[in-house]
């Protein structure tokens, strides 16, 4: 149902989810007594069908097929995609974290001595994380997202639609046979911003423009100021210790310097000082030759 809502707001209704997989396999009689992180990531594509039931069945079949290949992690797949496409990274930033089936009566129960009061996740390279679980006879869920990546109020509207869809599908079985557009009407121009400006990027006909070393140094210094850790020119921001929140802070700091057209998405797309500096070098050259005034681009919606 979450994918149905995301499709309605997306310029491209097909997309890939990043699933958190709890994969504690019975490899040893005492495997359940071992403390450790047994989670991994798995990619799952969403393709809307004629009805919600058809879409859900197709998704279930793809999930079953993907589980047969779970030895190949999502991280490995994304790295290979980046190598094939010759890009710094191929992000899959929309995450679904399900704890359904885990201690349905006691999992994060409010009657426990330690009660959940407030929480938030700050996972590197994640823009949107839907967490869901059952506890005390209730279905409980929350969304964590990088607010700076989305227009004000958009995610709140999506959340309201999602809650309404859950209630409807629980109470009205006929809704399972309805087309997705009848359940969640597509939002017009959802993939565009209200005051759209063309993105400034180097033309393919232009030769590659190497970044100035001073720009690389500036980015490294700004990273150290925000994160409190050093980063090498070729090192990935997240591997150097940054979180998505840190990139928001780094974006603000770099904009205060000479990079007023830099967007937050640019930092996720070019996630190292050298890659970001190369990108900025090309953008700056195009701006100087073709655009007398800086061009601002608002964040795209999902």
Image (cartoon, rainbow, N blue to C red):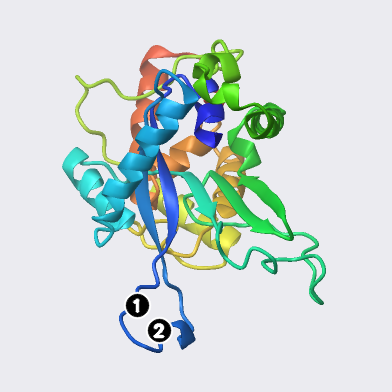
Query: Residue 271 bears which disc, if any?
Result: none
Looking at the image, is 82 positioned above or below residue 73? above
Nearest the eye: 51 or 93: 51
- Residue 213 appears in the figure: no
Q: CA distance from mark 2 to mark 1?
A: 6 Å
Residue ID at (26%, 41%) = 87
Query: Residue 31 bears which disc, if any?
Result: 2
Nearest the eye: 2 or 265: 2
Looking at the image, is 104 positioned above or below residue 209? below
Residue 263 in picture, x, y percent from top left: 52, 33
| Quarter in which the N terminus is drawn | top right
Query: Residue 26 bears which disc, if any?
Result: 1
Residue ID at (56%, 56%) = 100
Q: Tell me: 237 left or right of 101.
A: left
Q: Are marks 2 and 1 in contact (CB under 8 Å)?
A: yes
Residue 166 in picture, x, y percent from top left: 65, 34
Residue 72 in picture, x, y percent from top left: 24, 58
Q: Residues within 10 Å of mark 1 (few under 14, many from 20)?
A: few
């Amino acid at each position: 149902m979450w994918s149905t809502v995301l499709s309605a707001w997306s310029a491209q209704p097909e997309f890939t989810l990043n699933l958190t997989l709890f994969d504690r396999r019975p490899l040893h009689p005492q495997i359940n007594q071992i403390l450790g992180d047994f989670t991994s990531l798995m990619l799952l594509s969403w393709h809307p069908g004629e009805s919600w039931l058809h879409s859900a069945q197709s998704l279930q079949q793809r999930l079953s097929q993907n589980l047969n290949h779970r030895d190949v992690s999502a991280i490995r797949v994304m790295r290979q995609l980046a190598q094939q496409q010759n890009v710094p990274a191929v992000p899959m930033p929309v995450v679904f974290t399900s704890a359904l089936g885990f201690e349905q009566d006691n999992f994060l129960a409010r009657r426990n001595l330690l009660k959940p009061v407030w929480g938030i996740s700050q996972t590197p390279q994640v823009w949107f994380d839907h967490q869901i679980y059952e506890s005390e006879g209730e279905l409980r869920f929350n969304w964590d997202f990088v607010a700076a990546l989305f227009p004000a109020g958009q995610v709140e509207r999506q959340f309201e639609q999602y809650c309404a869809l859950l209630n409807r599908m629980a109470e009205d079985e006929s809704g399972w046979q309805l087309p997705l557009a009848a359940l969640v009407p597509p939002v017009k121009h959802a993939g565009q911003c209200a005051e759209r400006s063309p993105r400034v990027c180097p033309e393919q006909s232009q030769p590659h423009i190497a970044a100035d070393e001073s720009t690389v140094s500036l980015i490294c210094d700004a990273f150290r100021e925000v994160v409190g850790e050093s980063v090498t020119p070729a090192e990935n921001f997240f591997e150097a210790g940054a979180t998505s929140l840190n990139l928001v802070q780094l974006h603000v700091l770099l904009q205060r310097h000479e990079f007023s057209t830099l967007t937050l998405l640019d930092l996720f797309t070019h996630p190292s000082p050298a890659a970001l500096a190369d990108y900025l070098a090309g953008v700056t050259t195009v701006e100087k030759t073709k655009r007398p005034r800086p061009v601002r681009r608002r964040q795209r919606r999902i």
